[in-house]
Image: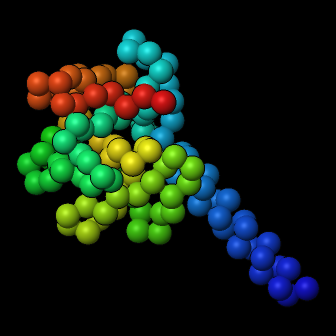
Amino acid sequence: MSRSLTLLAAAGFALIASAASAQMLKAADTAAGKTFVDAKGMTLYTFDKDAGGKSMCNGPCATNWPPLAAEASAKPAGDMTLVTRDDGSKMWAYKGKPLYTFAKDSKPGDATGDGFLNGAWHIAKP
């Protein structure tokens, strides 16, 4: 009986962790079509210079393009994966592509970073 309860509790925690990661990323209908947004409704972006599940946006870049931060206890779920940044912090990625917001987007639905830096930044889409 105790083993069954332990397994049930573990399954429950896994479900909660999966639901928490899913809440970090939502699809929203915007002027740019269906896009990914964070929990606050802010547009999420990918960066062409990121490769192999590694974020290349650090230092001043990360000030302008804040990474979609993940809690230390976060677990990957489905297409949502985790990337360890140069500073050791974790961030969310979709299908291995790190996700960022843009500091100049001031309200939900803004997508002013699309095409920034000679087209290197893109709205994240499902």
Closer to the camera in the image, 56 or 107: 56
Q: Residue furthest left?
A: 60
- Please provide percent x and percent y for residue 20: 56, 54
The colour scheme used to paint the residues is: rainbow
Quarter where residue 116 is shown: top left
Q: Is residue 1 above or below residue 14?
A: below
| In-image side of 103 versus 109 (left or right) | left
Residue 75 horizontal/vertical position (percent):
51, 63
Residue 107 percent across, percent down from the top left: 32, 27
Quarter occupied by the N terminus: bottom right
Locate residue 117: give its quadrant: top left
Q: Residue at x 11, y 24 (%)?
A: 118
- Residue lying at 42% horizontally and 33% vertically, measured from the top left: 37
Outermost residue, bottom side: 2
Considering every residue shown, the one lying at the far right of the view is 1
Residue 113, given in percent of the width and then of the height, sits at 22, 26
Q: Is residue 115 above or below residue 41?
A: above
- Tell me what residue is drawn at x 31 percent, y 22 percent: 110
For residue 107, say whether it is visible.
no
Give whichever of 36, 41 is nearer the camera: 36
**Is residue 120 at all visible to an observer of this figure?**
yes
Q: Height in image: 99 above or below 107?
A: below
Q: Residue furthest front?
A: 52
How many marks the image carries: the answer is 0
Measuring 26% from the left and 48% from the top, which residue is drawn there? 51
